């Protein structure tokens, strides 16, 4: 099966990570068959606040409304094999952990988990409460990968974009995509 990937962008801080993922996916288009994007209204507002633009509207990927349950990845039969929620708000994480499929983001995550496919949640919060940690435990036990938006500094990044790329590259590695990135020991 070719990669079919859902990208969900929530209203948590960290639009730079979502932008980095979308930008890098454009560069490796031969590695996937299909991409579907869900972006909440809050995510659009946060993007505009943090990045100062509405460039999310310029990506050629198909975007789906948060309540569009006719999106292909709302069903396991569409065989989407990876979902990345980036950034992932703690509210979204909590609803996914509780199995509350009240919108397309949580329904798609539920489908990915029930089909035993790859769900990557890029948690963007600090500090974590005990509820956050328990939700992360529940999701990890259900098969999800919790990837906090914690940058690394081995590559000696010098710009905010390079710092963010350390998280983006890790997420795309976890998704099984081949990218050019700093590798420890190389």
Image (tube, grey):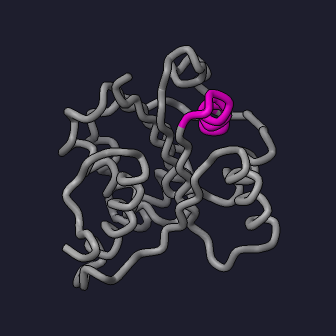
Q: Position of residue 8 (x, y in %)?
A: 50, 43
Query: What residue occupies the far front of the structure in this picture?
Result: 185
Quarter containing the N terminus? top left
User: At x 42% / y 34%, what residue is drawn?
Assistant: 5
Q: Foreground residue, 58 or 91?
A: 91
User: At x 55% / y 34%, what residue is drawn?
Assistant: 117
Q: Foreground residue, 98 or 91?
A: 98
Left or right of 156? Residue 130 is right
Q: Position of residue 83 (x, y in %)?
A: 50, 40
Left or right of 142? Residue 30 is left
Q: Is residue 173 above or below residue 163?
A: above
Q: How many marks?
A: 0
**Residue span colored magenta:** 104-117
Corner quadrant of residue 11: bottom right
Q: Position of residue 66 (x, y in %)?
A: 58, 34
Q: Is residue 127 above or below residue 59?
A: below
Corner quadrant of residue 70: top right
Q: Foreground residue, 82 or 163?
A: 82
Corner quadrant of residue 110: top right
- Does residue 108 show up magenta in the picture? yes
Q: Dominant secondary structure of the magenta stretch?
A: helix
Q: Foreground residue, 57 or 73?
A: 73
- Does residue 126 show up magenta in the picture? no
Q: Position of residue 42 (x, y in %)?
A: 56, 52
User: At x 73% / y 34%, what residue is drawn?
Assistant: 101
User: At x 74% / y 59%, what residue is drawn?
Assistant: 137
Quarter containing the C terminus? bottom left
Left or right of 40? Residue 127 is right
């Amino acid at each position: 099966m070719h990669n079919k990937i859902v990208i969900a962008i929530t209203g948590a801080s960290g639009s730079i990570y979502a932008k980095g993922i979308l930008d890098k996916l454009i560069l490796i288009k031969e590695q996937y068959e299909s991409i579907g994007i869900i972006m909440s209204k809050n995510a659009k507002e946060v993007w505009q606040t943090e990045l100062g633009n509405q460039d999310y509207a310029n990506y050629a990927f198909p975007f789906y409304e948060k309540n569009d349950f006719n999106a292909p990845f709302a069903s396991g039969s569409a065989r989407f094999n990876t979902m990345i929620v980036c950034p992932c708000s703690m509210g979204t994480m909590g609803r996914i952990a509780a199995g509350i499929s009240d919108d397309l983001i949580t329904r798609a995550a539920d489908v990915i988990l029930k089909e035993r496919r790859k769900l990557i949640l890029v948690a963007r919060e600090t500090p974590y409460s005990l509820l956050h940690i328990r939700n992360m435990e529940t999701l990890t036990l259900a098969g999800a990968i919790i990837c906090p938006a914690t940058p690394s500094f081995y590559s000696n990044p010098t710009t905010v974009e390079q710092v963010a790329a350390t998280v983006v590259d890790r997420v795309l590695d976890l998704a099984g995509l081949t990218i050019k990135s700093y590798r420890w020991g190389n």
